[in-house]
């Protein structure tokens, strides 16, 4: 990517500085909620109650985290989310890659027909109720599979992967391998997959973040709370003010402070894995969007 | 003759199937998945014309024609749902759509590349926060008792406001939080469009003595137009298609009068109220309108700008 503009006009003017200032301000505002949440979760309960925290932590206390980690429900839901993310992403990535590779092969006779078959579903769907009834009638109510099977393939990601195969694999590669007597499955596994690390990364990250953040299907299909994912548990704490967390706490003062801090600590615990891997995988996200933007 | 050509195409099909049998095998999970989870529900939508209740099958249900549609059109909620849906997504479009374009233009003008990259990275971050956490942050920051916003209001000598329970605040909060969460991410596609502008255009402009603002106006913005128009078509085509996930997390009976949209109503009546046929009818009505909207917007755009989705 060349940036032709910056070359000759190199003097930084007042306008440039104003722009930079504005952009820094935008970044700071975007980042502020994250900083505030972390500060609230690790401050001294007294400082939280006295409303002294507005940016950096006041004092230091991990009391709220202790409470979060002592709660069995959060561990169960954390484990569930990890299960949904691992199993779900594996299924997603495998099926998407297989389908996308087949659909990227120009000589595949059913290619256009299947692309239309998929594209139709992007503009038309049966709606919430028929899908809900179908998933129930397939016996997935209160089953872990309700969290991974109904969204097994995303048309958008399939198209991204197909674009990747079309633009970065030379046509001659599968053709010559076919002449050498390899089957298409052999070509896919032995030749194509080893060359596909970038697209596997893009798909894995897109799908995994989706699973990590998913809550609605759980609310639809899982009434058994031992199957609930983290996000549904968070909803209970953050938005429904579930008080059972604070049971056995004598001191009314601490109770109020912890009721507030607990929420912030749970946000941190839920979002931390994503925030931690984010800097390392960020470029793959961008790559995915760029691939999606390439028109045929 | 007819028979023979049928036989001929059957033979050709079989030959193709044999030739590509492994490719078919690779694509078969995709075929099966879309059939079961997308096409079967399309067929299932016919319960909108039936009196379907739990425990029955589609085949044993009674046909009732357009009864549920009529009930919906006559219901007191009809006008409210339609106007809430259109207003919420119309306002979202007006306020949210330009932000990533402006942001991309500004990023593009930044000279210091490291600073530019830092700003970009930070701006994508909110996109990865789940809706539950996003709405959780909103409701905690805005809590009338201990939220930071009301703390500031009180310190300024003002009365605390129950933002989340106040209908007047629902739309600004929904749209504002949406912008916070998506402006950076949505700018990526415009940044991609910017990299494909020919640098020679800028050189030529400079030789002709163009100012930077003139360059933006005559080169950069026209370079973004095709992408912007495409996204605008999609957005306009989805005008009646407001997602219910964020609304269900954000609203409460106190704000139903502005927050309840068609899809959240389908969820409440259809799933929570177990009125499956009625819910399916409202949902079907909504998707037919969406589809018609998308087709007409695409047609108008092709006519005006020669840009279209198909």
Image (cartoon, coloured by chain):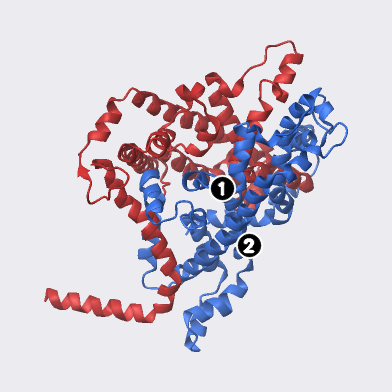
Residue A56 image offset from top left, x and y in percent: 83, 33
Occupied quadrant, residue A79: bottom right
User: Quick one: SS at disc 2?
Assistant: helix
Identify which residue is drawn at 70% across, 52% down: A3
**Would you call the spot at circle 2 few (<14 residues within 10 Å), some (14-19), or many (20 or more)?**
some
Find the distance from the CA under tag 2 to the CA under tag 1: 20 Å
User: Is A145 on the left or on the right of A81, as rendered?
Assistant: left
Identify the subunit bearing mark 2: A
Which residue is label 1 attached to? Answer: A214
Q: Is residue B215 above or below residue A190?
A: above
Residue B199 image offset from top left, x and y in percent: 65, 52
Identify which residue is drawn at 61% across, 42% down: A233
User: Quick one: SS at disc 1?
Assistant: loop
Residue toward you, A87 or A175: A87
Disc sitting over residue A201 in the figure: 2
Q: Is residue B171 above or below residue A103?
A: above
* Colour used to depict chain B in the structure image: red
Occupied quadrant, residue A108: bottom left
Report whether mark 2 lies on the same chain as mark 1: yes
Identify the subunit bearing mark 1: A
Dot placed on the residue nearer the N-terminal end, 2 or 1: 2
Residue A291 image offset from top left, x and y in percent: 56, 58
Residue B47 image offset from top left, x and y in percent: 28, 45
Query: In the picture, which chain is blue?
Result: A
């Amino acid at each position: 990517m060349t940036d032709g503009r910056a070359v000759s006009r190199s003097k930084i003017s007042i306008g440039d500085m104003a722009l930079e200032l504005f952009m820094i301000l935008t970044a700071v505002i975007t980042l502020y909620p994250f900083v505030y949440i972390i500060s609230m979760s690790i401050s001294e309960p007294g400082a939280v109650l006295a409303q002294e925290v507005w940016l950096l932590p006041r004092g230091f206390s991990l009391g709220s985290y202790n409470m979060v980690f002592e709660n069995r429900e959060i561990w169960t839901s954390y484990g569930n989310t990890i299960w949904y993310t691992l199993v779900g992403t594996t299924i997603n990535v495998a099926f998407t890659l297989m389908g996308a590779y087949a659909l990227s092969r120009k000589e595949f006779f059913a290619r256009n027909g299947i692309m239309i078959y998929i594209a139709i579903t992007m503009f038309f769907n049966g709606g919430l109720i028929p899908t809900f009834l179908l998933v129930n009638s397939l016996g997935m109510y209160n089953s872990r599979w309700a969290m991974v099977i109904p969204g097994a393939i995303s048309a958008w990601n399939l198209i991204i992967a197909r674009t990747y195969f079309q633009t970065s694999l030379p046509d001659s590669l599968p053709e010559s391998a076919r002449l050498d007597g390899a089957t298409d499955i052999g070509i896919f596994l032995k030749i194509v997959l080893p060359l596909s690390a970038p697209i596997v990364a893009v798909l894995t990250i897109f799908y995994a973040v989706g699973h990590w953040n998913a809550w609605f299907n759980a609310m639809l299909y899982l009434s058994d709370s031992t199957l609930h994912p983290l996000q549904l548990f968070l909803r209970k704490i953050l938005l429904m003010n579930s008080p059972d967390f604070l049971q056995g706490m004598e001191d009314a003062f601490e109770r109020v402070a912890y009721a507030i801090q607990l929420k912030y600590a749970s946000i941190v615990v839920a979002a931390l894995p994503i925030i931690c891997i984010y800097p390392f995988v960020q470029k793959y996200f961008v790559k995915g969007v760029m691939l999606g933007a390439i028109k045929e | 003759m007819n028979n023979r050509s049928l036989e001929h195409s059957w033979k050709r099909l079989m030959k193709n199937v044999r030739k590509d049998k492994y490719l078919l095998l690779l694509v078969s999970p995709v075929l099966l998945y879309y059939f079961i989870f997308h096409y079967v529900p399309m067929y299932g939508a016919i319960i909108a014309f039936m009196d379907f209740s739990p425990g029955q099958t589609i085949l044993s249900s009674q046909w009732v024609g357009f009864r549920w549609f009529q009930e919906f059109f006559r219901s007191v909620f009809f006008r409210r749902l339609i106007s809430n849906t259109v207003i919420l997504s119309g306002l979202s479009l007006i306020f949210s759509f330009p932000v990533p374009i402006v942001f991309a233009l500004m990023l593009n003008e930044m000279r210091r590349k490291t600073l530019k990259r830092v700003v970009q990275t930070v701006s994508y971050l909110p996109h990865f926060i789940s809706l539950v956490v996003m709405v959780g942050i909103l409701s905690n920051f805005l809590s009338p008792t201990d939220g930071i916003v009301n703390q500031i209001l009180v310190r300024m000598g003002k009365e605390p406001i129950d933002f989340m329970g106040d209908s007047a605040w629902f739309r600004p909060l929904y749209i504002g939080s949406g912008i916070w969460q998506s402006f950076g991410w949505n700018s990526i596609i415009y940044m991609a469009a910017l990299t494909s502008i020919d640098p020679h255009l800028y050189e030529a402009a400079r030789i002709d003595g163009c100012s930077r603002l003139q360059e933006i106006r005559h080169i950069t913005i026209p370079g973004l137009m095709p992408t912007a128009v495409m996204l605008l078509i999609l957005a306009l085509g989805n005008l009646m298609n407001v997602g219910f996930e964020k609304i269900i997390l954000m609203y409460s009976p106190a704000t139903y009068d502005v927050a309840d949209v068609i899809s959240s109503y389908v969820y409440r009546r259809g799933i929570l109220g177990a009125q499956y046929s009625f819910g399916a009818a409202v949902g079907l009505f909504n998707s037919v309108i969406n589809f018609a909207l998308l087709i007409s917007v695409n047609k108008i755009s092709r006519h005006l700008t020669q840009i279209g989705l198909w």
